Amino acid sequence: MKKLFAIILVSTLAFAALTGCGGSTETVSTDGSTSMELVIGSLGEAFQNDTGISFTYNPTGSGTGIQAVLEGRCDIGLSSRDLKDSEKAAGLTSTVLAYDGIAIILNPNNPISDLSLETIAKIYKGEITNWSQIGGQDLEIVLIGREASSGTREGFESVTGTKDACQYRQELTSTGDVITTVSQNPAAIGYASVASIKATVKVVSVNGVLPSEETIKAGTYSVQRPFVLVTKADTALTESAQKFFDFITSSAARDIISASGVVPAN
Amino acid sequence: MYKNQMMEKFIHGLFLVLGLIAVGCVLLITVYLVISGIPAIKEIGLIDFLFGKEWAPTTSDPAYGILPFILTSIYGTAGAVVLGVPIGFMTAVFLSKLAPPKVKAVMESAVSLLAGIPSVVYGLVGMLVLVPAIRQIFNVPDGASLLASIIVLAIMILPSIIKMSITALDAVPKEYEDASLALGATPIETFFKVSVPAAKSGIAAAVVLGVGRAIGEAMAVMMVAGNVPNMPNSLFQSVRFLTTAVSTEMSYSSGLQRQALFSIALVLFLFIMMINVTLNFFLKRERT
């Protein structure tokens, strides 16, 4: 019994000692947009594996992340919107990491193939309630969306200007569920990240432009938002933060960024 | 000899510790839920929280009313019981008293299989078959609704009701039925006027168990209910249950919204506690 206890004690101490001096003192801290969790998480993981520099990400929201950089509480801020002029004037600079394109999807049996941004907003606000009002079949429009805290929903609602005003018929918790539901109901409309679209639904063009890597990058496809890295313009990054910044904006990070479902900017 | 006694004591202690793990888990969960559920209720106000009709935690002017969820859970469960209990009860009477042994064996294993199907499969089938069917049969724009959830829940509670009722009916002493038959009652009269009343507290316990299962189900209803926090004013409305309210938003939530989700879980927990107390009441009465 005593022996067992001694073994446990020794191994605990050894473990504590190892963890105490094994970790690197170099760190990169990021703070901001919850929508960027997936992409920045996988980039951070790859970076940590390659360099041994530890990486932290604090999912607080774009506004808080920008504020954190300004106050020097983190190395790199993450924002899923462009910087405002006032924020630029405060000495911040932005680098686009990737673009998040959101496709508007319909049932394949729906004859409509193009919608303008205003029409989409009107549909989601409940001002247009029947497909026949915009030249479709005589069916009541069924609005499919995501749950209240989803990044895709936030992105869609901010681009279309429908924040807090959407009259959803269904709020689903995953992109896959949205696609399945839209593929089942001829009157449904939904939105989903461009990368996860399947052939079971029809992607409409918005203002005449279909979403693709090129149109999203060129900015002609309008239902998209940038994922932005926010840094201070006049202060240099720490050595490890600069390494991380260079890594994620290099072409080596392209595949990782694409794998998280967004379009890499570089 | 001394060594043997030590061993006895050691094993005794080990089993006690193992037993305490289960008790400890229950205590831990209860304490955790209460501690993490109370702050949001305090901040929102108990009345506003329980009887507020609007749930909009992410808007600029957040509202944290969970009355729609409470009512949906109650209506959904009640609906499932109304649909499921008659079917389950009749099936149990048939299997326990009337069915030929071969039929009984096949049907009982089918019922067991029904109990073993994971809830996500019920949800998936509901989403792909039931929801489009409701849309077409009732000619509504979308089939994801309270009705779809009720049907899915009714099917999900069938196995518990059937199995528990069969156990209760099988336990009725054969002498009761023999006496009834000897007095000239037909078998059907005997079953409904003698066997069922004799087994009634077991059957009541089966119903309560079904209620407990229905109110706690999250995955399957999440896939067919539509999940919009509407007041459940119609069978064809998209609704959100207490369980799905927690699971829908938990992954991304933060701050007061997250705390409020714990408060919802606490409310759900209280409901389930009440159901358990009722269940124990029926089971105890049966034993005495």
Image: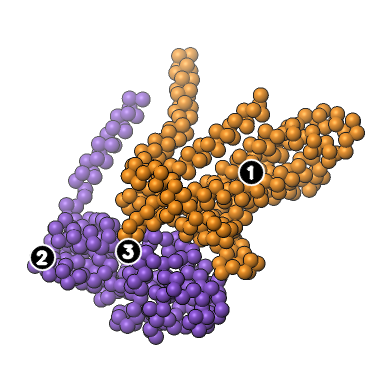
Chain colours: A purple, B orange
Residue drawn 23% across and 44% down? A18
Kind of residue at badge 1:
Ser
Q: Which one is nearer the viewer's eye here, A135 or A77?
A: A135
Q: Residue furthest top?
A: B1
Provide the residue designation for mark 1.
B160
Provide the chain ID for the residue under circle 2.
A
Amino acid at pointer 3 = Ser
Residue A1 lies, in percent from the top left, at 36, 25
Return the residue at label 2.
A236
Residue position for label 3: A35
- Is label 3 on the same chain as label 1? no
- Left of B257 or right of it: where is B113? right
In this rendered view, identify the residue nearer to me: B109 or B135: B135
Looking at the rendered structure, the secondary structure element under dot 3 is loop
Q: In this rendering, is residue B131 above or below A98? A: above
Q: Residue furthest left?
A: A234
Between residue B148 and residue B107, name the one nearer to us: B148
